[in-house]
Amino acid sequence: MHSMETKRKVERVIVHVVLIFFSIIMLVPFIWMLLTAFKSVSEATQIDPFVIFPTVWTADSFTKVWNNMNFLLLYKNTLLLIFWRVVCAVLTATLAGYAFGRLEFKGKNFMFSLVLFQMMIPAQIFIIPQYLMVSKIGMTNTIFALVFPGIVTAFGTFLLKTAYMGLPVSLEEAARLDGCNIFQSFLHIMAPLTRSSMVALGIFTAVFAYKDLMWPLVVNSSANMMPLSAALATMQGQYQSNYPQLMAASAIACVPMIVLYLVFQKQFIEGIATSGGKL
C-alpha cells in the first residue's frame, strides 16, 4: 500500500514537472517579445544568442509606437471586428446547426455536403469573390467589410449540428406534447442546452478574428479602418525593421485578448473543455 502511494506521488511529480517545462517553453516567445521591446535596435539585431536581457532597460519603444500609432482607434476596430463576427457566427451557426441536426427537409444532405466542402478547401480561395462582393456594394474601408467573411461559418455549423444531434429526441417530443412549435422548442429547449458549444464557437471565432491578417489588408486601404493585426504588419519594413518598436507594438496589441481572457476565463475553460476542442 505504501509503495503504491509513493508511486502515485512520483508519477504526479513527474507529470507536474513535464507540464511546467512545456508551459515555460510556450511562454518563451512572449517573454522574448517583452525583452526585445526594452532593448535598443543594435542589441535587438545582434547575432550573439547569449545576450538575453537588455544592457540598459528603456521604454522609448513603447512611447514612440503609442505616439505614432492610434492604438485607441485600432482597439476599437479590433473589438468591433471580434464582437460582430462572434455575434454573426454564433447566430447563423446555431440556426443552421439546428436545421441540419434536428429537422428533415429536401436537399438536406446535399446542402450539408456543401458546408463540409467549404471546410476542406483553403479559405484564401474565397478572398477574391468576397472582395468583389464587398466592392460591388461599395462597402470597402468599413467595419462591415472586416466582418463580412465571418457572417457565416462552416466550422460553426458543423460544431452546432454535432451538438444538436447529441441531444435526446425525447426533449423535443415532450415539448411538442406541451404545445410548443418548432421555433419554441428551439428557443426554449434545444438552444440553451448547446450553450457550451456556442461559447466554444465564440472563443474560436474571437481568436481567429483577432489574428486575421490577409483579409483586412485586402479589403481596407484606409489606416483608420485597420485592426491591430494589419496595423502591426505595416510596421514590417522591406529591407529593415525596428524590432524593439515592433515588439513593443505587439505587446500593446496583446492587451485586449489578455483582458478578455482574464474577464471570461471561466467561460473559456468551460467552453473548450465541454466541446472537446482545442485552440
Image: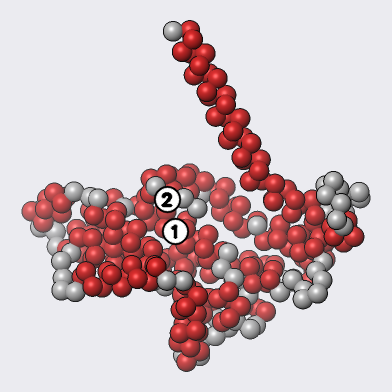
**Label number found at residue 135:** none
Q: Nearest the camera: 59 or 24?
A: 24
Q: Nearest the camera: 89 or 208?
A: 208
Residue 257 percent across, percent down from the top left: 59, 56
Mark 2 lies on residue: 277
Among numbered discs 1 and 2, the one appearing first in the sequence:
1
User: Residue 93: which quarter of the image?
Assistant: bottom left
Query: In the visual, does 173 lie left or right of 279?
Result: left
Residue shown at the point (81%, 74%) measured from the top left: 239
User: For numbered disc 1, what is the local secondary structure?
Assistant: helix
Residue 171 percent across, percent down from the top left: 16, 50
User: For numbered disc 2, what is the local secondary structure?
Assistant: loop
| Label 1 to label 2: alpha-carbon separation | 12 Å
**Label number found at residue 202:** 1
Label pair 1/2, CB-CB below 8 angstroms? no
Residue 160 percent across, percent down from the top left: 32, 58
Screen quadrant of the N terminus:
top left
Identify the amino acid type marked 1.
Gly
Up/down of 248 relative to 68, above or below? above
Residue shown at the point (35%, 71%) measured from the top left: 117
Residue 82 percent across, percent down from the top left: 52, 65
**How was the colour assigned to the protein in this rendering?**
secondary structure
Residue shown at the point (23%, 66%) measured from the top left: 99
Is residue 91 visible to the viewer in this orientation of the structure? no
User: Residue 90: which quarter of the image?
Assistant: bottom left
Mark 1 burial class by Cα count in 10 Å: few <14, some 14-19, many 20+: many
